[in-house]
Image (cartoon, rainbow, N blue to C red):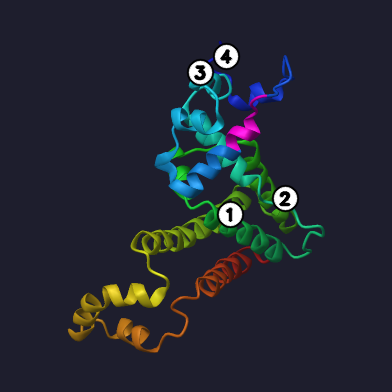
């Protein structure tokens, strides 16, 4: 039996006692990601995953001792999709922007990721730590103390999570309602919106409703907000 204080990552770092020909942690993670991507996070259970892989539930428990460990494995596999560019950007803002864009792409590819990260509260896996390492290494040339560098990382990461969470929520709503675009969403909420705008209590929002041209341009909105965060950091730290 594994030591209660020993993490899955410590177990994985040890050489295997025998070749794992029928099941691997990578295969488990890939199957769990596929299930969550297609059916949602609630569809992932040890029993269903075992059936999906064609093994017994007990066989699965030899590799992941709990559902929490399975979730860690899934998060780590999703973060593994981040890749370092062939040529690292010279400017720290360009590097942080590239990291943030990758994080958004992965979160949109795996819409359950934000929900799962929120459930876990603290997530420590090799690829999660590697993502933090990339940010901190990117900021080293600015001469920041370690607390400030970590605060910059958290500021950018928090922006990405918040922006992507709203985008994912809208996508999931449109998927459930079988809506094909933003016009379908606006048609559905039109009566309530028209009544509120008709009260005259929301003139600034009324101007947005009537004049906005980028209501469905999530990428532009994300990039603008990200630039605001990075410009704010640059103004504060002098980079």
Residue 234 in the figure: left or right of residue 108: right
Disc with the residue nearer the chain's start (2 vs 1):
1
- Give coordinates of residue 102: x percent, y percent: 63, 58
CA distance for labels 3 and 2: 42 Å
Judge by depth and name the residue closer to the eye, 39 or 141: 39
Q: Secondary structure at mark 1?
A: helix
Contact (Cβ within 8 Å) of mark 3 with mark 2: no
Contact (Cβ within 8 Å) of mark 1 with mark 3: no
Identify which residue is drawn at 55% across, 71% down: 219
Question: Residue at label 1?
Answer: 106
* In this view, the mark in front (3 or 2): 3
Q: Which residue ends up furthest to the top in the rendered image?
A: 1
Q: Which residue ends up furthest to the front in the rendered image?
A: 54
Q: Secondary structure at mark 3?
A: helix
CA distance for labels 1 and 3: 31 Å
Question: Residue at label 2?
Answer: 137
Q: Secondary structure at mark 2?
A: helix
């Amino acid at each position: 039996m594994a030591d209660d204080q020993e993490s899955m990552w410590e177990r994985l770092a040890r050489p295997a006692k025998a070749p794992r020909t029928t099941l691997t942690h990578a295969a488990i993670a890939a199957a769990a990601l596929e299930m969550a991507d297609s059916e949602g996070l609630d569809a992932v259970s040890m029993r269903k995953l075992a059936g999906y892989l064609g093994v017994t539930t007990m066989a699965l428990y030899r590799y992941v001792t709990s559902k929490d460990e399975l979730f860690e494995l899934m998060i780590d596999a999703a973060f593994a999709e981040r890749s370092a560019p062939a040529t690292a950007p010279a400017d720290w803002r360009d590097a942080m922007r590239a990291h943030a864009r990758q994080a958004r792409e992965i979160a949109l590819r795996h819409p359950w990721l934000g929900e799962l990260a929120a459930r876990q509260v603290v997530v420590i896996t090799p690829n999660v730590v590697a993502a933090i390492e990339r940010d901190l290494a990117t900021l080293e040339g600015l001469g920041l103390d370690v607390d400030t560098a970590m605060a910059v990382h958290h500021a950018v990461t928090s922006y990405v999570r918040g922006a992507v969470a709203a985008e994912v929520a809208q996508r999931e709503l449109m998927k459930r309602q079988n809506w094909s675009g933003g016009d379908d969403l606006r048609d559905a909420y039109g009566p309530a919106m028209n009544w509120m705008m008709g009260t005259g209590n929301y003139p600034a929002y009324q101007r947005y409703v009537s004049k906005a041209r980028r209501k469905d341009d999530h990428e532009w909105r994300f990039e603008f907000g990200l630039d605001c965060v990075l410009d704010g950091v640059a103004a504060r730290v002098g980079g």
